[in-house]
Image (cartoon, rainbow, N blue to C red):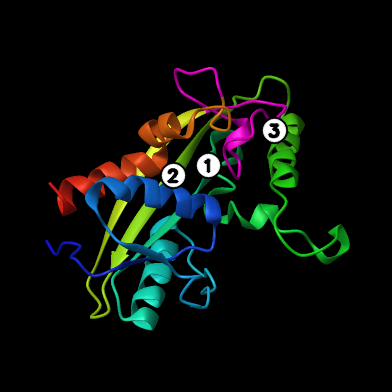
């Protein structure tokens, strides 16, 4: 299996929260990370219908454009009662429409959308959910590998906490009482879906 070398690793994300988490998880392995944004790389359109497809799409685009190995993350919230939605469209649910104000993502709106759909299903609707993560490593010559992670939990309302991003304020991991947005970042990094995927990456790349 090909391993990450001494050359810089491009982190193929424009999401500042994801970038911070990925950099923190790679710090112990002395990997020099540079963001796709700092290199001025365009953000590819995520046309995949699975987390794997989108992660590979982003990793390959960054590796080819920068001519460096690249790591991409595709992740999202999956709600059991909603048939796994929003899933691969997690970020899309936060996109403001033209009539909703300035362009960009409104995560409170997205969390409210999920809550509204659960309420429509009735008060006894299970609130089980999970976060899924796929990490894709790609090299300029076309070699690639993926690592998948998951953390189970349940949704709560109203949102709580300010330490996370995305849907973190409404997600309580199994066995806990605090939302991801209430947890210390180090604790979240230890148990998250991204940490699960990273554990598999680390075992193979640095083990």
| Image height of 27 relative to 128, above or below | below
Who's the residue at 41% across and 33% down the image? 186
Q: What is the spatial separation of the Cα atoms under label 1 and label 3, in whole angstroms?
A: 13 Å
Q: Which mark is residue 78?
A: 1
Q: Position of residue 85 (x, y in %)?
A: 58, 46
What residue did someone put label 2 on?
132
- Whether residue 148 appears in this view of the structure is no
Q: Is mark 2 on a helix, strand or loop?
A: strand
91 is higher (above) or lower (below) than 110: below
Q: Does the magenta stretch include residue 162?
A: yes
Magenta stretch bounds: 154-178
Res 128 visible: yes
Contact? badges 1 and 2 (CB < 8 Å) = yes
| Residue 77: percent from left, percent from top | 54, 43
Mark 3 closeness class: few <14, some 14–19, many ≥20 residues within 10 Å: some
Residue highlighted by disc 3: 118
Q: Position of residue 3 (x, y in %)?
A: 16, 62
């Amino acid at each position: 299996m090909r391993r990450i070398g001494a050359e810089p690793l491009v982190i193929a994300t424009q999401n500042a929260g994801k970038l911070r988490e990925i950099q923190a998880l790679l710090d112990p392995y002395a990997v020099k990370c540079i963001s796709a944004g700092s290199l001025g790389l365009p953000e590819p359109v995520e046309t995949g219908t699975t987390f794997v497809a989108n992660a590979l799409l982003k990793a390959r685009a960054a590796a080819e454009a920068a001519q460096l190995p690249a790591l991409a993350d595709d992740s999202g919230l999956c709600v059991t009662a909603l048939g796994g939605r929003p899933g691969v469209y997690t970020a899309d649910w936060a996109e403001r429409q033209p009539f909703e104000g300035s362009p960009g993502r409104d995560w409170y709106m997205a969390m409210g959308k999920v809550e509204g759909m659960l309420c429509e299903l009735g008060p006894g609707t299970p609130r089980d959910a999970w976060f899924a993560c796929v990490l894709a490593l790609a090299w300029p010559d076309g070699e690639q590998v993926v690592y998948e992670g998951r953390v189970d939990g349940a949704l709560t309302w109203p949102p709580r906490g300010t330490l996370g991003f995305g849907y973190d304020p409404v997600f309580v991991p199994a066995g806990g009482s605090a939302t991801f947005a209430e947890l210390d970042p180090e604790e979240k990094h230890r148990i998250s879906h991204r940490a699960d995927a990273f554990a598999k990456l680390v075992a193979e790349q640095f083990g």
